[in-house]
Structures are given as structure tokens and as C-alpha cells.
Image (cartoon, rainbow, N blue to C red):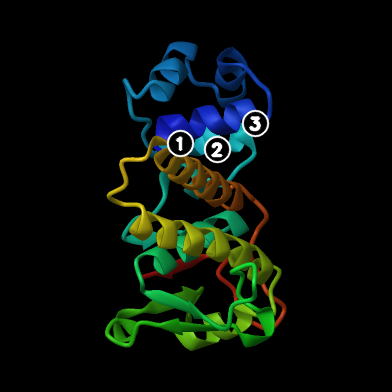
Amino acid sequence: MTIGEKIKYFRKRIGITQAKLAELSGIHPVSIRKYEINKMVPQTQQIEKIAKALGISSFALTGIENNIRLETIGDFMGLLIMLCKTHIIFIEGKRGEDEALLPDTVSFKINPFIIQFFSAKSGKKNIKADDILYHLKSDNIFQDILKWEKVNYVYEKCAVKYSDTTNEADKNALEELKNTKEAIEIELQRSNVILNSDDGISVKNHIIV
């Protein structure tokens, strides 16, 4: 989805008009309309105003950048999904009959070729990648990422199997599965709850990948 499509999605999700979003964000209604139809691309300042008006993380609209500010659960989920999709982080474990990973068997691993370039900070404190992955399993994020992983796994499996199909029913089913996966991804990124932890590890400030 483009930024404009995501703005439209989240606006409709909370049931407000373009005019209301313009009022809440302080951005001209014409600009909102142009953003949604991809005639204009909002700048960082406008994105932050729109995200605040929609009650979501700005990361849910923009996705990944080289230097990422992680402040919310939505920010972190967006980063985690991106890292999994690009095979920087691997989620491994045994699968049940429904294709979902069995929680007790799950482990998170970072690609050994790039772990040396991974750097995370909380204030002045450096955090090892392994520390972050360890704490994922004890966090509420764990269950959410496993739900996404199942859908993503099934989609990728079907995409390979039906990549050359000419059957319209198969094409439509694959497209529907893709849309479901993307909807789950953006839903997981919408949380604007501040990230922090009680044991000294926090991604409330900045993380650099």
C-alpha cells in the first residue's frame, strides 16, 4: 500500500471523513484528498499530524527508513515484520496442523552475515540484538507476530505454488490472501502505545539498524 492508501484505510477504519481528518490534523482538505489518491506525498511533519489525528503510529504510514525512531508498539511491529520479510530475522519452530508455529518451540535468530552491523540503543545504553530477541518471547508482541507469521508463511507458500497459474479462481484466492496479509500487517502497526520495559531494556528512544 502507498502512504495515501494507508491514510484512507485508517481514516475509514475509524469512520471519519476527509474533512474531519483535515480538521483534526490541521491540514487542508484538498491536501488530504490528494494524499489519498496519490497526487501528493505528505512530508514528515504532515505524516506525524495525520498519524496523531488517526490515533496510530506514524510508522504505520511510512514503513522502514535507514534510521528508525521506535517509540510505540506499532513502530516496533513494523520494524519486526520488515526484518522478517527481508530475512534479517528468522522465526523458527515446529508447525502444527493449522500451519501455525507452536509457541513453545519458537526461536528468533538474526542472519549471521549481518548481525555484526546490528546496533540498538536506549538512551546511552547499547543493546545486543540477542537481548532484544530473547525478550520478544516474554512480551505480548510474541503472540501477535506469530499470528502474522502464519499468514505470511501460508501466503508465500501459495505464491510459489500458484505463481504461474492461469486459473482465475486460484489468482483471486491468492490476491485475497495477499490482501488479508497486508491488512494484518498494517493493523499490527497501528498501535501508538509507548514501548518500554521494566528490566532496563527499552526501545522507547531510538534504534539504528
Mark 1 or mark 3: name the one nearer the start of the chain. Answer: 3
Instruction: List x then y, in percent, for residue 155.
Output: 46, 56
Q: Judging from the image, what secondary structure is the residue with disc 1 in?
A: helix
Answer yes or no: do the residues labelled 1 and 3 have beta carbons within 8 Å? no
Quarter of the image for residue 157 reads bottom left
Residue 51: which disc? 2
Answer yes or no: do the residues labelled 3 and 2 have beta carbons within 8 Å? no
Rate crowding at label 1 as few (under 14), some (14 to 19) or many (20 or more) other CA atoms within 10 Å.
many
* Residue type, label 2: Ala
Mark 3 or mark 2: name the one nearer the start of the chain. Answer: 3
Q: Nearer the viewer, residue 165 or 116?
A: 165
Residue 13: which disc? 3
Residue 71 visible, this angle: yes
* Residue type, label 3: Arg
Instruction: List x then y, in percent, for residue 86.
Output: 34, 66
| Residue annotated with mark 1 | 47
Q: In the drawing, does residue 63 fall left or right of residue 99?
A: left
Q: In the drawing, does residue 114 fall left or right of residue 145?
A: left
Instruction: List x then y, in percent, for residue 119.
Output: 38, 78
